[in-house]
Image (tube, coloured by chain):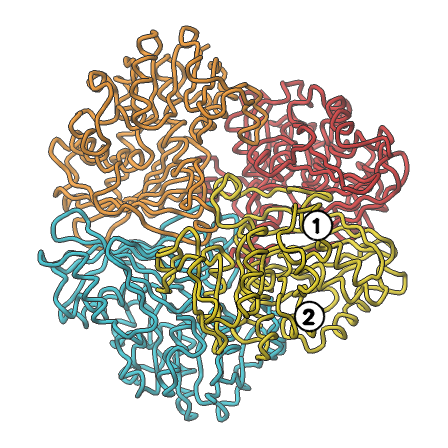
Chain colours: A red, B cyan, C orange, D yellow
Amino acid sequence: MVRIGIYGATGYTGYELLKIFARHPEAEVVFAASESSAGKRYSEVYPCPYEQVLIAPDEAPLNRIDVAFLCTPHHASAPLAKKVLDAGAKCLDLSADFRLHDAGVYQAWYGTHAVPELLGEAVYGLTEVYRAAVARARLVANPGCYPTGPLLALCPLLRRGVVTGQKIIVDAKSGVSGAGAQPTPTTHFVNVHDSFSAYNIGHTHRHVSEIEQELALYAGRPMRLVFSPHLLPLSRGILSTIYVNVGLDWDPRSIVALWHEAYRDEPFIQVLDAGKLASLAHVVNTNRCALSVASAGVEGEVIIVAAIDNLLKGASGQAVQNMNVLFGLDETLGLVA
Amino acid sequence: MVRIGIYGATGYTGYELLKIFARHPEAEVVFAASESSAGKRYSEVYPCPYEQVLIAPDEAPLNRIDVAFLCTPHHASAPLAKKVLDAGAKCLDLSADFRLHDAGVYQAWYGTHAVPELLGEAVYGLTEVYRAAVARARLVANPGCYPTGPLLALCPLLRRGVVTGQKIIVDAKSGVSGAGAQPTPTTHFVNVHDSFSAYNIGHTHRHVSEIEQELALYAGRPMRLVFSPHLLPLSRGILSTIYVNVGLDWDPRSIVALWHEAYRDEPFIQVLDAGKLASLAHVVNTNRCALSVASAGVEGEVIIVAAIDNLLKGASGQAVQNMNVLFGLDETLGLVA
Amino acid sequence: MVRIGIYGATGYTGYELLKIFARHPEAEVVFAASESSAGKRYSEVYPCPYEQVLIAPDEAPLNRIDVAFLCTPHHASAPLAKKVLDAGAKCLDLSADFRLHDAGVYQAWYGTHAVPELLGEAVYGLTEVYRAAVARARLVANPGCYPTGPLLALCPLLRRGVVTGQKIIVDAKSGVSGAGAQPTPTTHFVNVHDSFSAYNIGHTHRHVSEIEQELALYAGRPMRLVFSPHLLPLSRGILSTIYVNVGLDWDPRSIVALWHEAYRDEPFIQVLDAGKLASLAHVVNTNRCALSVASAGVEGEVIIVAAIDNLLKGASGQAVQNMNVLFGLDETLGLVA
Amino acid sequence: MVRIGIYGATGYTGYELLKIFARHPEAEVVFAASESSAGKRYSEVYPCPYEQVLIAPDEAPLNRIDVAFLCTPHHASAPLAKKVLDAGAKCLDLSADFRLHDAGVYQAWYGTHAVPELLGEAVYGLTEVYRAAVARARLVANPGCYPTGPLLALCPLLRRGVVTGQKIIVDAKSGVSGAGAQPTPTTHFVNVHDSFSAYNIGHTHRHVSEIEQELALYAGRPMRLVFSPHLLPLSRGILSTIYVNVGLDWDPRSIVALWHEAYRDEPFIQVLDAGKLASLAHVVNTNRCALSVASAGVEGEVIIVAAIDNLLKGASGQAVQNMNVLFGLDETLGLVA
């Protein structure tokens, strides 16, 4: 039994963790902490039958857990992670605090880092890419929701030298849960329903830094991202349409073959046959990432379509996948493959 | 040209008024006032091309308008109405402040009334029922969104003595715009989308007071309402399913005939043939009320289904309809019949 | 390992079964049959990674299964059920063919029954009510989607004599998956989205027969149902608002206590505290039924709100729950409690 | 009074025309024709109060109209257009039959053209670009829904030489009404709702031919389109995210200025300030096209976001706009600016 603590338990990623652990046979939630809802039963916060009482973060019994999930915002996670590690538990952080390896890059996109000395140790938890390192880690930085699909799609191509040029365009569309549980004009039903909008397009969304870091690592050279996030009138899922230049000897069929080779035994990667395109229906409510590719109709250019559930493979599902790796469990426990 | 002032212009009903007046050939918006957004152009508040600059309510040039629309909350409307009337303009209030004739009833449901002396003068602006009084009014209390459909459905039946017993059940379903533009957990997209819920059911929603007042006036005897509001995962529209006991000589066909007779020349009442049922698709984005009725399969009981757009016939549309009546204009100006 | 066969596997209930069995540790799908899609892989029919090849119903290896799930329409299920039983397997029918005990009642609502001799043997599979009989059955008639919520809500009340009078009103709202996978004008996205409509209201929907049969059995006297189904603009879930007359010594608090007593150890029944109301968010994507009750504000009348996921507790989930009972397994295997 | 005939009146574009003409002060619908619904009242086909009886296309009194709107599919429109013109009426075709100037290109994308001799005469009805020609036309080819937004966005840039290189990427997202009123698996509510998908991406969607024709005309040189249509879970609207290379002396601010100059007095073009992005909420239920632009964060590249209502500015609204031009009326009559 892995003993679990959850910080920031009343956000959407915390709720997903509780749902996953309710059916995970090898995990036990020792505490769920929340600044704002301490003292409430979980069923008072979300329409569910979980009667666990939320505790204040300060009262978390760190000595009784094996691993903490940090569903806290960036800047809040960093000092918490230190506290958890100091208490001898492992730490899975779902915020951006440990995704960037370079404190200067973090500074540029997020501001000053509270515990930069931990950056070097943190493992970027894109499980299929960094499984071996995750297995040995104390501190795992769970990837952002937008990066996960494009990185899984592009990693085999970049490592194999398929991609030409520096620029990749990702036109991404996300459900509203990605904006968090806080009520704001942006998440007001009437503003979202029946609309569709772009925001922070170009080179301005913070996930750009994380995606560019990883693309460069896979490619072995700097890469430049043009990134256009959009808000979909639905709750869950991210679909990314990716415009990428490839060598003239590559086409959708050979890229599909490359993915099959790279992800042969992966339970959560669904590679679609050439000619079929991934949709949110392929992945919502699962921990899968669906990958597909088509010709752009222009020589040396293809269009990749990648889909995930932002709260599962894009957050809590991948975090549990990482936990399963960390503790030597069957990687699919608690998750829908 | 009717000269218009709008208070509380940045709520949903204010936005609907601006859209209506943009195509109303006999109205001119002199000012749109907003406490929170004074100084902004309207296009900064809503995704529209209206470049009108919002003013602070205190700076409203009351001497330059013929009529003020109060899109302000209850308790805020009452003193504003007095100010408007004192300045010599007419007043159309979209809040609950002047819908109840009895200050004691108002007290019980809303608290102390600020200007009870105006209650006697206010006309309840259910246009099809009170058109003559509206035409002569200084102060019109625009009906609530929930009451409009059931009252239009039931008025002819109650006046004709069709309804037996005291109790009427209204099972009502409303779109989210009825909850207002304020971001709250209740209006957060993720909480509403793909869900459906009841709230304030029984005899607790404030519109109960208004509906019971009117039912009693039409029936000439006290009536008792069981009222169950529900929240639909869509932006606009209210559909009311109404369970009513009727005399044994009445059936859906004769009730349809009665409505046709009562509403013969009404441009905004759509009576469906017996056997057809009203849906939100009949009325959304129009000022219509669609009426339909079916047998309950129990002797002496029918089921009425009534539909409106809550922001138009249930609020701003009916308010403009009343304004058209007030100023002797074609009643359909600016509105979709 | 329970060996499973599925007929009608490409409808929504068949798809749900495949998703459930993908995570059920004690079940193995031996065949999935489909008249229209035989020869296709399942992943060609739905956006999922199931590569099982669909077979023609005639080629089903009945000797290799322990139980067949019939996701076929009424009239198609009856002869299939006979064939399955004759082959020595058990049978879980999700159609209406075996829900009514009386061939005459079946005749009145559905037409002539093909194998009326099996009607006496079939067990109505409302698990919480008929668990012991289900455990011994060869043939289980899985309840309809609309009946499940109201029957679970009302059974304890009727058995205890709480309900007065004969008439019960059920105002029910269902997601679109209840209308099946066939493309029709009724299920066209543009006709459903942003609309809300009533259909077959009064005493005309076929589920009336099934609900009245059960209500009478629980009450020990005939009951009369007024039933108003509505179509919600969402995919899954049924919320039923139930108007019921009760003895003057009963109120929401004591009814909640009665439910707690009746459903004490039930993993799939969630009784909400008095003052809280069930919503679809409580149950969608789970096998739960959420029960709640409030005062109608009229003496001797309460309003019950019951919610289920129509494809799970209202169909495939309850069918698997029954299968678990039939084979002596933990009742929650494969299901979300 | 312009006397109108409508063919194919029961599709979505026909329904929009009827709604527009219900409030158009200078138009009278003489006939609405439908192959499949001849003899029915319009209110039996759509939930509206229009009691006009649909006639068979063969019985259309062409001698009594000034202009026919063809809401018929490609291949069906071409011979109808000839018939209408021969009868002396003008013709507004909403199909693709007269959008391509070159019969060979038509052949390649749609097959053999039935009346190629009319291709030379037809005017491409992008009103803001071809207003003068529309005013003199007998036969107007109303633009496709996908082309309208990108062409309005790009025309001023291409004419001014802003765009460098040949390739333009349009990542477009459309509501479901674009797929037509026919019930199919693609338009089944459950398949669309809560999903999002790409289809016909690259260089395969038929609108590619039309867009490339126009881009080349504006640029004075061949252009190459990469086009990715997606299906949004909503009924109306198209938002296009356009990746375009521009000269180094151009930036979002100067492009906004260029649009303002090009579209100075256009009632239906809404140019957003630099820094703001168009959304569907800007345009749905109006005849507007909203234009916006942002930096791509890569030198010499910008991202344009253009939005329209596919049934209005992308179909019936623009058709009526063209009709207003054709008959010398105020261009905004019947339309929401």
Q: Which mark is residue B294?
A: none
| Quadrant in the picture for the C terminus of chain A | top right
In the image, residue D125 sits, relative to residue A324, either above or below, namely: below
From where the camera sits, is residue C262 visible?
yes
Q: Position of residue C229 (x, y in %)?
A: 30, 45
Left or right for B192, reference A124 = left
Q: Residue at x 57, y 44 (%)?
A: A11
Question: To which residue does mark 2 refer?
Answer: D128
Number of dots carrying numbers: 2
Q: Residue at x 42, y 24 (%)?
A: C8
Question: To which residue does mark 1 refer?
Answer: D171
Q: Position of residue A84 (x, y in %)?
A: 68, 33
Label 1 is found on which chain of the structure?
A: D
Identify the element where label 1 is drawn.
strand
Q: Amino acid at mark 2?
A: Glu
Q: Of residues A96 and B95, which is closer to you in this image?
A: B95
Q: Of residues A197 and A300, which is closer to you in this image?
A: A300
Q: Of residues C311 and C218, which is closer to you in this image?
A: C311
Q: Residue at x 40, y 27 (%)?
A: C316
Q: Position of residue C227 (x, y in %)?
A: 24, 44
Q: Position of residue A133 (x, y in %)?
A: 77, 25
Earlier sequence position, callout 2 versus callout 1: 2
Q: Quadrant of residue D302?
A: bottom right
Identify the element where label 2 is drawn.
helix
